[in-house]
Amino acid sequence: MKTFQTSDDSVVVVIGSGAGGGTLANELSQRGINLVCLEAGRRLAPEEVVNDEAVMAERLTWGDTRIGSGIALKQFPVWTCKTVGGTTMHWTASCPRMQEHEFRARSTYGEIADTSLVDWPISLQDLEPYYDSAEDKMGVTGTHGIARLPGNNNYKVLESGARAVGYSAIDTNNVAINSATRDGRTSCQQLGFCTSGCVVHAKWSTLYTEISKAETTDHFELRPECMAEQITLDKEGRVASVTYRDKQGQTVTQQARMVCVAGNAVETTRILLNSHSKRFPAGLANSSGQVGRNYMRHFALPVIGIMPGPVNMHRGTHQAGIVKDERHHDPQRGFNGGFLFLTVPFTPEIVAKVVLQDLWGERLAGVMQQYSHMAAMLLHGEDMPQESNRITLHPTQLDQNGLPVPIIHYESHPNTEAMKAFAAQRGRAIYAALGAKEVFAVPDVFPATHNMGVARMGTDPARSVCNSWGQTHDIENLFVSDGSLFPTVGCENPTLTIVALVLRQADYIEQQLKKGLI
């Protein structure tokens, strides 16, 4: 792996090594562009990835202090990863594409009170070639001739119940998990530990794919355990360097030709707001006041059914099961936008402590004794952007790195509440149709995992942070390269769209660099 001098101002600095940062870093390195990738977490050795969810949760989770406000969980409002590969180490690899109408949310839904609803500055047609490239790169099943994964028992219950209530758009999902050996990675072994890092590397994670490939070039340097603190400017107002704290706790400054921020929504917001200056007193690239605003997340509604016979939901691929019948827009249901049903297993600990947290004693014990008979799904749907849902920095409280602690404020919009109520009723009906003894549906019990929207793209610099390429309106050599770019979120898992956006961004950056415009 190449090593660059901190005084080398010809390098591109990418902050973050997850779906956005890791993919962009590899794309630019493969094109001969010198690049330093800063990752706050450490790099796990192969033997440190194990089939133990409790162990891996400790090794992967970003545990630094964050404060939840509103209905966000107070002590743990978001779940992201602090490790090389970012949250692609923990994700379920579900890869549905966003739908055409979701790129035109404002035009489709009309004016909705108490929202900052807009259309995307790009269309589905603009992104389709990059969706194609992303699916091929990631090995997404059900696309480009790649066989789908088989359905486990949890899927078979979901499919049977969904068909019983009249649904038909049902399959084992488009997932970035190999159904056969591909791209140097083996096929899924149905081990049931998808969110624990995938010991066999069947799941696409940037640690195993993009980062490893970038390291085969002579243009890439990964610096793990390096926490970015500030981005600094030169006299002309262009990005000049990134200051970070290395694994020894020393403050280091890396000069840069340009910087791409891909820290997931919370950390992308924090570094931009923390990089305030006389030129940008409210935070870097924040002349619009929109950095940190319009924070969105998909609601996560678990539904668990106690079925008549054994299911053993923990066996097999986590989200190889999806029902898409409710993801369309139909305001006659009482809300705008749509939602998805996805299979997901829950460990006994999560079922007892989180999903069924209101039960206790003999009642809880009686339910938990039926764990082998449980089937489970997770429903998530479109969230409306609201300027008041935002990420800010605590005025006095600092974390162990000396950085201001992020505050994540979130309140659910009435549209989301109406959607959740409808979704819960439909989820219950699926299991009831198969004779479930009991069905549990408990909203707002999980920290947010799909975090988006805090540096939205748009054509109006007064109402957005970035243009359609993720280039900040205020600073031409500063980019945002993660889900923070989303103007609206649709109902689909965001990772495929993030990868598609950064593939498009990589083309643009390469062109701009060749023209000497950055």
Image (cartoon, helix red, strand yellow):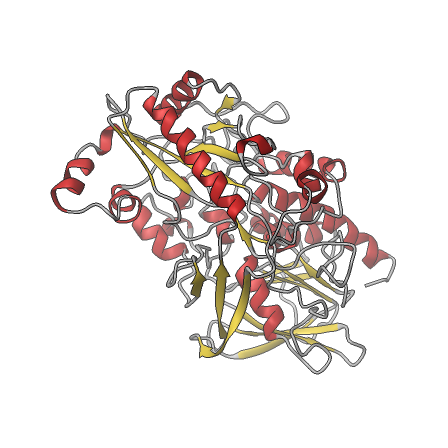
Q: Quadrant of the N terminus?
A: bottom right
Q: Is residue 253 above or below residue 474?
A: below
Is residue 215 visible in the rendered image? The answer is no
Considering depth in this image, is 110 or 398 the residue closer to the camera? Answer: 110
In this orientation, which residue lies closer to the viewer: 421 or 235? 421
Give left or right: position of 120 versus 492.
Answer: right
Residue 61 position in % (x across, y down): 41, 57
Measured as percent of width and height from the top left, residue 232 is found at 68, 76
Q: Position of residue 370 (x, y in %)?
A: 20, 32
Residue at 49% over, 58% down = 410
Above or below 136: residue 218: below
Counting labels gives 0
Residue 441 appears in view:
yes
**Which quarter of the figure is the C terminus placed in?**
bottom right
Q: Place residue 63 in its image quadrant.
A: bottom left
- Residue that lies at the very extreme toward the right in this rendered image: 515
Rendered residue at 35%/42% (across/down): 442
Q: With 145 as the anchor, is 346 left or right in this view?
A: left
243 vs 287, left or right, is left
Give the quarter of the image for residue 367. top left
- Please name whichever residue, 11 or 453, is drawn nearer the observer in this view of the structure: 453
Q: Residue at x 78, y 81 (%)?
A: 235
Residue 447, horizontal then vertical, whole percent: 41, 53
